[in-house]
Amino acid sequence: MIYWQIMEELMAKEDKKEKDFENHIREIIKNKIICSKNDFMLLDSKDITDIIICRNINIPKIFFIEVKHYSDKKGRIGFGYGDGSGFQPEILRKRPKYFEDSFIWIFQKENDDKYYVLNNDDCLNYISGGSIGEVGGKQNNFQLKLFDDIKPMNENDFLKWLENWLLK
């Protein structure tokens, strides 16, 4: 097996871990938050971000959640596409006001059951290289020091925080 095939297999396994974390977040939102709130919907499709939640009350709102999982094998936390393009880099680069309070990032690292939540402003402090690459350029990554700097939450604290965020 050549090097690239081995790397593709490793990346596929690591992508599965991030997908598993995303599915876990979806399930706890569905079963522990949305199940008791008729005015909220969790969308199944995810073209923009990993998780989209719609609030259908007097002041409707859409919430966007991007889920990132770090593992030692992968060695990085990438976002967007490998050439600097994608929805997430564009949101962080252009800073539309709508996403200031409706878009969060949830991070987890391998062998850690804690949740690390950042908004877009916080994320900008952890961009590898200090800036987001232009389209056609480099893969964008987050610095791993975010796990040292951001206060982690256990699942119960995370659920309380998330419910408050959805209701504000």
Image (spheres, rainbow, N blue to C red):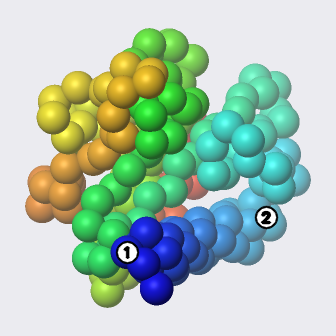
Which is nearer the eye, 103 or 124? 124
Give the label, 1 or 2, closer to the camera.
1
Residue at screen point 42% across, 31% down = 84
| Residue 135 seen in this snapshot | yes
Quadrant placement of the C terminus: top right
Residue 73 in the image, given as x and y percentages of width and height:
30, 77
Residue type at tag 1: Tyr
Residue 25: image tag: none
In the rendered image, residue 38, in percent from the top left (x then y), is placed at 87, 53
For the residues labelled 1 and 2, the Cα–Cα distance comes to: 49 Å
Residue 155 in sight: no
Residue type for callout 2? Ser
In front of the other: 67 or 37:
67
Residue at the location (23% across, 26% down)? 131
Q: Are marks 1 and 2 in contact (CB under 8 Å)?
A: no
Residue at far front of view? 2
Structural crowding at the residue carrying mark 1, measured as other residues with C-alpha within 10 Å and reported as few (<14), some (14–19) or many (≥20): few
In this figure, which residue is indicated by the disc labeled 1? 3
Q: Earlier in the sequence, mark 1 or mark 2?
A: 1
Look at mark 2 in the image and give the residue it sits on.
Answer: 36
Q: Badge 2: few (under 14), some or many (20 or more) residues near its Cα, within 10 Å?
A: few
